[in-house]
Amino acid sequence: MAKRKQLGSIPVYRKAMDLCHMSREIASYVSFNKDLLQLYRSNSLRDHMADAILTDAILIPQQIALAERSKSHSERMRSVSFIQIMIRNINSYCTGLEKDGVKEREYLHLLRNELLSFYRSYKKWRKGLSRDFG
């Protein structure tokens, strides 16, 4: 319990959780299959992209927690790199959903704005991690 409370006090972790919640809402809205746990089984490209957004958004706070708990500099930097890739992927999936014909692009813009807000917090956090070992 104490670990969770500590994670909740870290701004980048809270931003990652906000990103998770928004991703879940967007995935639910844009997918044809409303059972989010079954999106990977769908034959729809849109469902696969929604699933990928959701998966990456869920992995981000897990990687933050891993980096925060790790004493290894290389493990922390691996998590930082992984998060960077997931940020880029989510942006790409948003573009893919636009090209797939999602009509309500404003929802994707909201997700991108949330991603940008997270990224700003992430950059500050990343610098702090580097200083811990610098």
Image (spheres, rainbow, N blue to C red):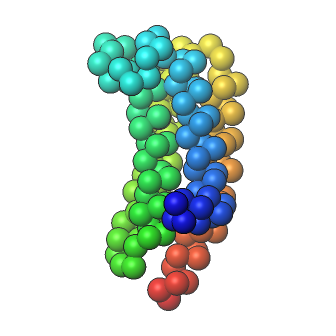
- The number of numbered discs placed on residues in the rendered structure image is 0
- Residue at point 37% right, 14% down? 44
Above or below, 124 relative to 91: below
Q: Where is residue 72 in the image (x, y as percent from the top left)?
A: 36, 78
- Residue at point 32% right, 24% down? 40
Nearer-the-camera pick, 101 or 24? 24
Q: In this view, does 105 lie to the left or right of 48?
A: right
Location of residue 30 by image quarter: top right
Q: Where is residue 99 in the image (x, y as percent from the top left)?
A: 51, 21
Q: Can residue 88 be seen in this view?
A: no
Q: Is residue 127 visible?
A: yes
- Residue at point 56% right, 34% down? 23
Location of residue 19 by image quarter: top right
Q: Position of residue 105 (x, y in %)?
A: 65, 22
- Residue at point 52% right, 60% down? 1
Above or below, 13 relative to 70: above
